[in-house]
Image (tube, rainbow, N blue to C red):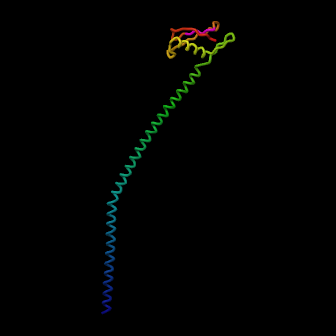
Amino acid sequence: MARTTARTAKKKAAAKAATAAKATTKAAEAAEEVKDAAVKEVEPKAEKAVEADIKEVAAAAKETVKDTGAKVVDKAKEVTKKVEKTVKEKVAEVKAAAADPEVYVQYQGNESNLAVITERIKKQYVEEGHKESDIKSLKIYLKPEDASAYYVINDNNSGKVFLF
C-alpha cells in the first residue's frame, strides 16, 4: 500500500506539474497576446507622433531655406548694384580720359595748354559775377598772332584772355 500511495502521489505530482506547465504556457501565451495588443495599439500612435515630428522639422527647414534664400537674393542684388555703379564710374573715367586730349598752342617760342586757357576763361567769367555751374557751352577761338584766346559762353557772353 505504501507503494500504491507513492505511485499515486507521483501521479498526482506529475499531473500537478503538467497542469502547472499548461498554466505557465497559457500565461506565456496570454502575455504574448497582451504584448501584441499593446504593440498594435502603440504603433499607430508612435507613427502619428513621428509623422508630426517629421512635418514639424520639414516646415522649420522649409522656413529656414526661405529665409536664407531671401537673404542670398538681397545680397546678390546689393552686390549687383555696387558692380554696376563701379562699372559705370570706370566707363565714365575711360570716356573722360579719351575725350579730353591735351592740346598745346605754340607760337614764336611761347607755349600754352588748352586746359590752362580754359581755366583762365572760367576764372574771368566768375570774376564778372557769374557762376561756373551756369556754363552750358564754351567756344574758344585761338589767335596766336594776337596772343589771345577769344571765347563765347552760352552763345551770349564773350570775352578775351591772354594765351601766354
Q: Left or right: 91 with respect to 69?
A: right
The image quadrant where one finds the N terminus is bottom left
How many numbered callouts?
0
Q: Residue furthest top?
A: 146
Residue 148 is one of the magenta-drawn residues: yes
Magenta region, residue range: 147-151
Compared across the picture, whether 21 is left or right of 155 comes to left
Assign the C terminus to one quadrant of the image. Answer: top right
Pinpoint residue 91: horizontal percent, then vertical percent: 55, 25
Give left or right: position of 97 versus 17: right
Report the residue at 35% width, 57% height from top. Answer: 46
Most extreme residue toward the bottom is 1
Nearer-the-camera pick, 156 or 92 = 156
Residue 17: name its quadrant. bottom left
**Foreground pick, 114 / 90:** 114
Viewer-nearest residue: 9 or 109: 109
Query: What secondary structure characterizes most of the magenta part?
Result: strand
Residue drawn at point x = 31 percent, y = 69 percent: 30
**What residue sits 35% from the left and 51% below the top?**
52
Relative to 99, is 18 above or below? below
Q: Residue at x 32, y 77 (%)?
A: 20
Residue 42 x, y percent position in the rendering: 33, 60
**The magenta stretch spans residue 74:** no
**x%, y% of residue 107?**
67, 10
